């Protein structure tokens, strides 16, 4: 008897870690990467830690400006955006009972980009509050459409196809905006949303996006227990005391806040919401509710790491972080698809 | 708790699935809900669990409409075993059963020792203790059903609704699961189970409710309900009905009337 009682309260699923240990380790990783992101730069002026320290001695004012005006905004954004994408991915996967659900794959990110582009096209400035608003509206429409198109069937292919359709629609509309861009400068700005990057962001971007992302977190984090119940199917979850209607609405609106605000200030960064929950799921014993906080930390770590990566990888032009995650994420997605096909003949 | 259907009518896209059904289910009675496919059994059961809202009439639990119950209180009162048996993630069996404790937990509580003890008991009742550490995705259909029954038992509901709980079980586990349900009824719970195995229904249930085309067409003791006439008229079969050790044995033998005509 006591053996089984222990099995309920203590980790015993293969590879599972104690929640506190996992969260502690991930937090430590985030803190380390956060500090590294502040000191590691691109180019020869302040390429490494030593360079920054010597600059600090020679010219403290410049060093301070680099730290607070250049490094800090992009580091904060990477942290916030990564956490938001990781959390949205984990919630969507739990809600749709599908390990392939991810904001970018399902068209939520590209719709947010379209929303931001539309707002920009009609004259909003680069740090206007209208940008995240446009992004949120885009995500809201896309996620709502997705659930309507068959997100509830749990058919992986239906879901992926719905995402493909939404992505096709939004990229056509974004291309249209690009096509009719009034100036090369405007075209470059639009391309930014398609590629996704933390470079050249200011604290203003952090200020307009951060509160919205935090509102998104506050909406998404309490869905954990409902997601556990949804493991048993929507009817059973309903009889366990949850209103599926409410959970769905909360998840959609929360995702809209998170993804809409994130994409509006950094462009589309794909696959974070796919990779992070997948990697962390075994460590929490596959419990969808316990996955949420680790996915926020994991997403933040991945995003910080990727953004350090694009600075370290030396190219004459800086690699956009959205391009890097897509290059890593797409093969990962193909791998997941083939694993799923093998396990379900 | 008394669960009562009062003139319940439910339509799907205008097609009636349940038509003017009234019946009161008493605690302490093991009720079998029987009838041919498409008779409306599952729809009626879903209405009892407040998963469908009747187009007319009402389902009343303990004097109050089920839809008026506070969600969590209703979740504690009614345990529902759905026909859908899929579990998405490879959770361990013990954790799936522990999900049955959700309505009893506060929003940020983790499962406490008292809950764990109840889970252990539910695992034992459904004979799945030996599977406790297994991932549910590796179980057979029958094992999965028993795990999900344990999940319902862990909630310790006053009203237990089970939709075809024994359809994919082997003979020994069919007997065992029905024994569990019967002992729960004896302990004062209200137990309703959808069954297709009529011999077992006759043996274990105190009362059978026979549905056909959305309506209750017979309601009473097994020997009142399981007659040659009812079997032919509603199931479309000629059944051999005999007694063995003082209990009914119902063996559907061949097709009768309309169904057999349609086949020929």
Image (cartoon, coloured by chain):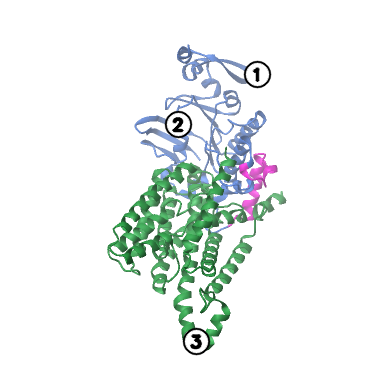
Chain colours: A green, B blue
Q: Which residues are magenta?
A: B110-137
Name the mark nearer the viewer: 1 or 3.
3
Q: Is residue B84 above or below residue A143?
A: above
Task: Kindly report the distance in space between the C-alpha atoms of the residues bearing marks 2 and 1.
Answer: 30 Å
Task: Out of B210 and A23, give the one closest to the viewer.
Answer: A23
Residue at image point 57% right, 39% down: A344
**Disc 1: which residue:** B244
Determine if marks 1 and 3 fall on one subunit: no
**Disc 3: which residue:** A60
The reply to whether the C-beta atoms of the residues labelled 1 and 3 are less than 8 Å apart is no
Where residue B132 appears, x then y in whole percent?
Answer: 67, 45
The reply to whether the C-beta atoms of the residues labelled 3 and 2 are less than 8 Å apart is no
Q: Residues within 10 Å of mark 3 (few under 14, many from 20)?
A: some
Task: Out of B260 and A278, give the one closest to the viewer.
Answer: A278
The reply to whether the C-beta atoms of the residues labelled 2 and 1 are less than 8 Å apart is no
- Badge 2: chain ID: B
Q: Residues within 10 Å of mark 1 (few under 14, many from 20)?
A: few
As for residue B121 lying within the magenta part, the answer is yes
- Badge 3: chain ID: A
Task: Out of A29 and B115, give the one closest to the viewer.
Answer: A29
Q: Is residue A75 in view from this perspective?
A: yes
- Badge 1: chain ID: B
Identify the residue at the far bottom of this view: A58
The numbered dot on residue B130 is none
């Amino acid at each position: 008897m006591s053996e089984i009682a222990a099995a309920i309260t203590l980790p015993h699923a293969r590879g599972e870690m104690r929640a506190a240990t996992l969260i502690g380790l991930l937090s430590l990783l985030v803190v380390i990467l956060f500090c590294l992101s502040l000191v590691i730069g691109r180019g020869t002026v302040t390429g490494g830690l030593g360079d920054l320290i010597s600059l600090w001695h020679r010219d403290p004012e410049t060093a301070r400006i680099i730290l607070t005006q250049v490094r800090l905004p992009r580091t904060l954004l990477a942290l916030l955006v990564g956490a938001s994408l990781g959390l949205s991915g984990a919630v969507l996967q739990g809600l749709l009972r599908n390990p392939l659900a991810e904001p970018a794959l399902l068209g939520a990110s590209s719709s947010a980009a379209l929303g931001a582009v539309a707002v920009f096209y009609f004259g909003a400035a680069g740090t206007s509050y209208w940008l995240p608003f446009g992004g949120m509206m885009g995500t809201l429409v896309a996620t709502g459409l997705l659930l309507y198109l068959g997100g509830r069937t749990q058919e992986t292919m239906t879901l992926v196809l719905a995402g493909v359709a939404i992505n096709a629609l939004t990229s056509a509309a974004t291309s249209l905006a690009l096509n009719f861009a009034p100036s090369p400068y405007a075209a470059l700005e639009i391309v930014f949303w398609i590629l996704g990057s933390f470079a050249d962001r200011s604290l203003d971007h952090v200020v307009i996006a951060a509160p919205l992302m935090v509102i998104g977190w506050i909406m998404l984090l309490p869905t954990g227990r409902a997601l556990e119940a949804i493991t048993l199917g929507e009817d059973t979850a309903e009889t366990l005391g949850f209103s599926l209607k409410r959970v769905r609405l909360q998840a959609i609106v929360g995702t809209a806040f998170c993804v809409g605000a994130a994409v509006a200030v950094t462009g589309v960064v794909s696959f974070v919401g796919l990779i992070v929950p997948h990697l962390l799921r075994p460590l929490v014993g596959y419990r969808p509710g316990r996955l949420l906080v680790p996915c926020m930390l994991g997403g933040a770590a991945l995003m910080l790491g990727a953004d350090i990566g694009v600075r370290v990888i030396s190219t004459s032009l800086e690699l956009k972080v959205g391009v890097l995650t897509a290059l890593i994420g797409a093969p990962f997605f193909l791998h997941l698809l083939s694993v799923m096909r093998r396990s379900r003949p | 708790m008394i669960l009562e259907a009062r003139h319940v009518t439910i339509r799907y896209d205008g097609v009636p699935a349940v038509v003017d059904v009234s019946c009161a289910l008493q605690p302490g009675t093991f009720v079998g809900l029987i009838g041919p496919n498409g008779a409306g059994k599952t729809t009626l059961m879903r209405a009892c669990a407040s998963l469908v809202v009747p187009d007319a009439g009402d389902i009343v639990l303990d004097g109050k409409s089920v839809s008026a119950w506070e969600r969590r209180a209703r979740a504690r009162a009614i345990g529902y075993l759905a026909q859908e048996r899929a579990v998405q993630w490879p959770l361990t069996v013990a954790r799936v059963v522990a999900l049955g404790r959700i309505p009893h937990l506060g929003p940020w509580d983790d499962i406490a020792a008292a809950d764990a003890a109840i889970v252990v008991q539910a695992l034992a009742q459904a004979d799945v203790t030996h599977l406790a550490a297994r991932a549910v995705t590796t179980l057979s259909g029958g094992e999965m059903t028993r795990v999900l029954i344990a999940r319902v038992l862990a909630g310790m509901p006053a009203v237990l609704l089970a939709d075809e709980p024994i359809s994919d079980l082997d003979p020994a586990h069919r007997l065992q699961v029905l024994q569990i349900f019967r002992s729960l009824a004896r302990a004062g719970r209200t137990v309703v189970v959808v069954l297709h195995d009529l011999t077992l229904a006759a043996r274990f249930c105190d009362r059978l409710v026979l549905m056909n085309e959305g309506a209750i067409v017979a309601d009473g003791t097994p020997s009142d309900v399981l007659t040659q006439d009812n079997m032919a008229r509603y199931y479309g079969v000629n059944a051999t009905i005999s007694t063995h050790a003082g209990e009914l044995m119902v063996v559907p033998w061949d097709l009768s009337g309309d169904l057999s005509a349609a086949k020929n």
